[in-house]
Image (cartoon, helix red, strand yellow):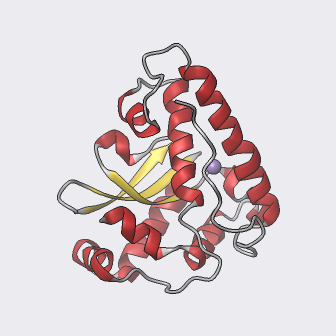
Amino acid sequence: MTYEMPKLPYADSALEPVISQQTIQFHYGKHLQTYVNNLNNLVSGTEFEGKTVEQIVASAPDGAIFNNAGQVLNHALYFTQFIPDQKSAEPTGGLAEAITRNFGSFAEFKKKFNEASVTLFGAGWSWLAADKDGKLHITKEANGGNPVRAGLTPLLGFDVWEHAYYLDYQNRRADHIEALWKIIDWDVVEKRYK
Ligand code: MN
């Protein structure tokens, strides 16, 4: 299997001012491309050749293959969860009900998710994920981690590596996190929950 770049469902300048064209060009065009290239090189001739990124993230030991597979999976989910002209600032349907059931309200969920994103020390990801019973969890993952490793389904991920926001927000991670809510495509997140 050859691992490929996910297609961006929007123009590289379409998420401005939340995420600049320059950040997309570096983050998607350079950082993600490097993870994809690394993964293709690393799995060649190993037991992981031919496996999906999800299978690798779930089963590979800590190390370069896991790190790069994690980042390929993370960024494929990340770059396809945004939309330039957001239809709704909140989810609807089954996901909205699950958020209310698990966190009390959307506002309370957002507060907890922001807290997780801002307090994650160093590089990593915050995720909304679902377990096999549909229960929702907020997880903090270091480096290239993904909830798939714990048997959960990832629904929404915020990248808090500095490469995701430093050109646009410098040290202001909290401002970047708050702005991201304006470009979430809740239809995509809802589909991942079903
Ligand atoms: Mn990233």
Determine whether, in the image, residue 101 is placed left or right of residue 176.
Answer: left
Q: Give the quadrant of residue 52.
A: top left
Determine whether, in the image, residue 47 is placed left or right of residue 102.
Answer: right
Q: Residue furthest left?
A: 133
Can you see residue 121? no
Residue under the image location 50 percent in, 39 percent down: 70
Relative height, residue 143 to residue 169 (above, below): above
Q: Residue furthest front?
A: 1
Q: Position of residue 71 (x, y in %)?
A: 56, 41
Q: Position of residue 9 (x, y in %)?
A: 63, 65
Considering the image in quadrants, where does the C terminus appear? bottom left
Q: Position of residue 161 (x, y in %)?
A: 63, 50
Q: Give the quadrant of residue 166.
A: bottom right
Residue under the image location 31 percent in, 82 percent down: 93
Residue nearest the viewer, comparing 7 with 157: 7
Residue under the image location 51 percent in, 60 percent down: 117
Determine whether, in the image, residue 167 is placed left or right of residue 62.
Answer: right
Q: Position of residue 170 (x, y in %)?
A: 76, 60
Total marks drawn? 0
